[in-house]
Image (spheres, grey):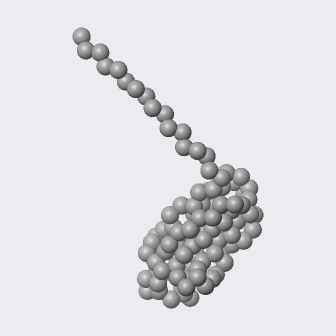
Amino acid sequence: MLLCETNIYTYHKPVQDFVLHQNYPNPFNSQINISFELKKQDEITITIFNLNGQMVTEIFKGMKEPGYHVFIWDANNVSAGMYIIKMGAGSFVGVKKCLILK
């Protein structure tokens, strides 16, 4: 008789107040989706910077309720290249890169 012992491991991922997802599509040529999740209502800021550290545009600044959110950045008036998406919510700051191809 063969006895098989099974070990069950449970992994609990800590609940974060804020999650900034990977932007898509990336690379892109006109519009990109910027998505994130909030655990609680918070004031957020979404800002785009070029690689010289200059602010290109501020996508949003204000309060957002808990849940999943998506903003669309229309980059038709911006030249091709690499850009940084910076998002702040409370004390958290998330950063993602994106590439515009024209």
Q: Position of residue 57 (x, y in %)?
A: 64, 81
Rendered view: 9 above or below 79: above
Q: Residue furthest top?
A: 1
Q: Position of residue 19 (x, y in %)?
A: 59, 57
72, 16: nearer the viewer: 16
Left/right of residue 37 with respect to residue 22 in the rendered view: right
**Count of all numbered marks drawn on residues in the image:** 0
Q: Quadrant of residue 48?
A: bottom right
Q: Quadrant of the C terminus?
A: bottom left
Q: Residue at x 57, y 61 (%)?
A: 20
Q: Residue at x 50, y 38 (%)?
A: 11
Left/right of residue 96 with respect to residue 65 in the rendered view: left
Q: Position of residue 28 (x, y in %)?
A: 45, 77
Q: Quadrant of residue 1?
A: top left
Q: Residue at x 59, y 64 (%)?
A: 94
Residue 65 in sight in this render: yes
Rendered view: 35 above or below 59: above
Residue 70 in sight in this render: no
77, 13: nearer the viewer: 13
Q: Position of residue 72 (x, y in %)?
A: 58, 72
60, 14: nearer the viewer: 14
Rendered view: 48 above or below 42: below
Q: Residue furthest left?
A: 1
Q: Residue at x 62, y 61 (%)?
A: 69
